[in-house]
Every structure is written in C-alpha cells, then in structure tokens.
Amino acid sequence: MEKYLINPNEKKSEICKDIYGNFSEHLGRCIYEGLYAGENSDIPNVNGMRKDVVNALKEMGLPVLRWPGGCFADEYHWRDGIGPKENRKKMINTHWGGVVEDNSFGTHEFFELCDQIGCDAYITGNLGSGTVQEMSEWVEYMTFGGDSPMSRLRRENGRQEPWRVKYFAVGNENWGCGGNMDPYYYSNTYKKYATYVRVYDWNNPIYKVACGPNAEDYHWTEELMKNAHRMMNGLALHYYTITHNWGQKGSATEFDENEYYMCLRKAYKIEEIIRRHLEIMNRYDPEKKVDLIIDEWGTWHDVEPGTNPGFLYQQNTMRDAMVAALSLNIFNKHSDRIKMCNIAQTVNVLQSVALTDGADMLLTPTYYVFKMFKDHQGNTLLGSHLTTDKSGEGENSLPTLIESASEDENGVIYSTVANISAGESKQIKCQIADSLVKGVRAEILTGAVDAYNSFDNKENVKTAEFTDFELTPDGFTATVPPCSVVKFVIEK
Ligand code: AHR
C-alpha cells in the first residue's frame, strides 16, 4: 500500500489557469479544417469556426490559445491576413508541406475564434523574417484604442474596439526555424524588437515572451538571462517527447511495452529539464520576475501511414494520455515559476485534443485528461507526497505514481493521480493532514496502453465514474488500475 499525504496547511503557489493552454499553427489541418471550416462550409459553423470543435474546447476549459506558429510565425506577414478575403495575398507554407496558404484565417478570425471559445490570445510575432516596424504595427493594429494609422485600418476592416493580447512572443525557435541565430545575436535582436512592442493599455499590459531554449540547451538560457532578462516577462522552453529519435520517431499506435515506457521516460525528463533551466534563471533573476513558459510540448510520433509527412497528423492513445497526465502534474508542482504551457497542437497535428474527418470529430484520450484536470485551474497547489516504486526497465524506468493536489476557494481538494504502470494496479492510502473528510467522488480515464478513439469507435476511451475506493476518517484508500489517471474530489 503506497502512502499519500496531502497537506492543506501547506499552501503553495497559485496554479495559473494558462498552464492548460493549447497551441494552434497554420500547419496541416490544424487551422484549416480543424478549427476553421470557412463561412461557406457545409460543416456547421459560426462565422467559419467549427461548432463541434469550439464547443469541445469550451467544455475542456481552454484558457489560452497560441497562434499563428511555430515555425510559420517567423514567415507570417500579418497584413496578408486582413481585409476582404478575395484580396488577401497567398503565400507558400514552406515549413509545412509547401502548400499554398490563402490567408483566409488571419488576425480578425483568430480573435473571433478566441471569443467563441472564451479564451485569451497568445500571439507570436515575426522576428525571423519580419521588420521591427511590422511587428510594432501589428501590436498597434490589435491593441491601440485611440486614433492612429493602424487603429484606423482595423476599423476599416470592421473592428471598432481594440482586442486584448494577453501574451506576445517576440519570435519562435530563433535558434532554428526562426532564423538560426546564436543566443548572443538573438538576445540583442530580442531587445530591439521588444522595445517597440508597445503597451497602449496599462490596464491590460502585454506580457512579453522571449524565445527560450530547445530542450536541454542550457547555454541558450544562460545567455538570454544574462543579456536580456530585464526586458522579458517569460522565457519559453520547447520540449517534445520523441520515443526513438528524430529520424524514426516511432508509431503513434503500434508499440511494445518497452517503447511505452521509453516514451513515458522521455516525457518524464521534462521534470529535470525544468529544474535545470530554473536554476539558471534564478541565478540571474533571484527575485523571480521572469516566468518559465512551455509553449510547445507533447508527443511527436511518426505521421499516420498514408498522410502528408508535412502535416504531422498522428493518432493519440492512452500512452499519450499518460504523457499529458504526468506532464500536467509536473507543471502544477512547478506552478510557482511556470505560468503558461501550450500543448502542440489543438486539432489534427501532433498531440491533439481533437481529430476531424470532414464534418466528423472525435475527442482524443489527451482531451479527457485536460478536461479532468481543468478543476486545478486557478486553485492553490497543496504540499503532497505519494510513495512509489518504479516501472519500466533500466534507463526507461520512472516513478509509477505521479500526482498533484490543489484546493479551490471553498476548501475542496482535487487530486490527480497517474498510475503509469502498463500492467499493475496500485493501492494507495491517502490522508488529508489535520482534516476530517466528509466525502469523496472520483473519475477515471483508463484503457490498454495502445487504446485510442477512431472514427469507427469514437468512444472507445473516455472518462467514467470511479468507485474503487473507501472512505477513512481522514482520507480514503483506493486501488488505481494500471495505465490510468484518477481524479479524486475531496470534501472536508
Ligand atoms: O509544432 C510543430 C513545430 O515544432 C513548430 O512549428 C516549431 O516551433 C517546432 O519545431
């Protein structure tokens, strides 16, 4: 029996709701088909936005959406995506399949989408191939409420009031697709561009995000923090979970037990990576003014056979759900320093929460994890500890049980426990320190490690009520099945 202690006396950080963000890029069928069907589509839509996907994202509690990229952002010229659609300039999406981008989804459409979902906007500006003036004018176009050349243009295009841009990134992956820069060059360039990302409304100041490191590139973090930390609010780390290697990543649905653990072990590595980047950040910024942002994370598998390799379309199994659950638990535990995370990507690309096929849509196991965990949004992280053995062999082993616990403003406790073991259930005895427990209810997501939802069987994996627990005066005992995530809602 594993011992699980949750301590309501140990109130830690607020879990910023934006940890539960998504990322959506002009890539494959994410924006076009996935989120935006077009105003004249037969697919049910409101102003072009798919009703089914928007409703699903609303129910999932999506707090913030990142757009327009990714690599696409550093080739995107925002003026091509405004004004009458028939006049919009076309371009080649060089990063993603070389397809023609018609710019029918641009700034106005993005804010319409955010409005319909009820989420905040996170915009990535073009530092790689755009000018300082272009970036500065985009910010003026979106956020200036007075009379100016850009706000006049916005009004001519049908939008009277400025929008709220909560987060603005000054470039994306500028160590790679965003210009192949070294950290010295980028940090100076960042400072130049960021200077002209003006705040026009001090009630809604723009939170500026600098391009952070790729995974374990600690040198990048060191130089950025040394040279530019005073001009940024957040530094954005990217970390993808790739089971094998970039050349041959591995199938999304066909894998053996060893590959299952290999993938989870790679996902779990993010814990060490976060700690090491934070250690560097804390040295240059002991007052901890700069947050860590993880604006691209998730699994990256081989594309589904027969699909365009440039479209990054992959299925999503319970293995992906376990990656989501363990990552979100880790992000919660670091919520004193991590303020936003954006899984890549929302629909039809990489570790999506929804997949579409024409007018049809399914929700992935990852979707259900986000929906279960949404109760943590805005709560206070509590001190908690769960004893655990390890699962997996040798270098592919990791803790079997990974959890986090939070408390809402009414004193209700939410605990999300992931049992990553492929075959063993785990008994836990949970105690809530100094508390009498009135009641517990619980929900579970479980299935075979390779179980997924297909368009022929859309509800193969979904959440269900969980009853395999017994109350004790100060907590409960429970048997958590293998490859499952259980949410306990505990009333004191
Ligand atoms: O999410 C896919 C791509 O991965 C993004 O465009 C890029 O930023 C990263 O390399």
Image (spheres, grey):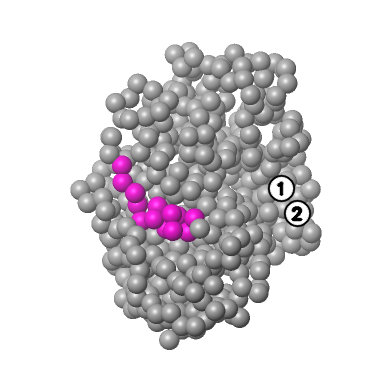
Callout 1 environment at 10 Å: few (<14), some (14 to 19), or many (20+)? some
Type of amino acid at the residue the image marks with label 2 = Lys
Determine contact: label 1, label 2, CB under 8 Å. yes
In the displayed structure image, the side of residue 178 where residue 469 appears, left or right = left
Quadrant in the rendering for residue 426: bottom left
Ligand 1 within 8 Å of disc 2? The answer is: no
Residue labelled with disc 2: 289
Residue 69 picture location, percent across and down = 52, 38
Look at the numbered disc 2 and give the secondary structure of its residue: loop
Asked if the stretch drawn in magenta spans residue 243, the answer is: no
Q: Which residues are magenta?
A: 361-374
Residue 130 picture location, percent across and down = 62, 29
Residue labelled with disc 1: 233
Callout 2 environment at 10 Å: few (<14), some (14 to 19), or many (20+)? some
Q: Please tell me whether residue 23 is drawn above or below residue 152 in the rendered image.
A: below
Mark 1 vs 2, N-terminal side: 1
* Residue 463 visible in the snapshot: yes
Name the residue located 53 percent from the left edge and 16 percent from the top edge. Answer: 83
Q: Please tell me whether residue 328 is drawn above or below residue 481 in the rendered image.
A: above
* Residue 97 visible in the snapshot: no
Type of amino acid at the residue the image marks with label 1 = Asn
Quadrant in the rendering for residue 273: bottom right
Q: Nearer the viewer, residue 254 or 402?
A: 402
Asked if the stretch drawn in magenta spans residue 369, the answer is: yes
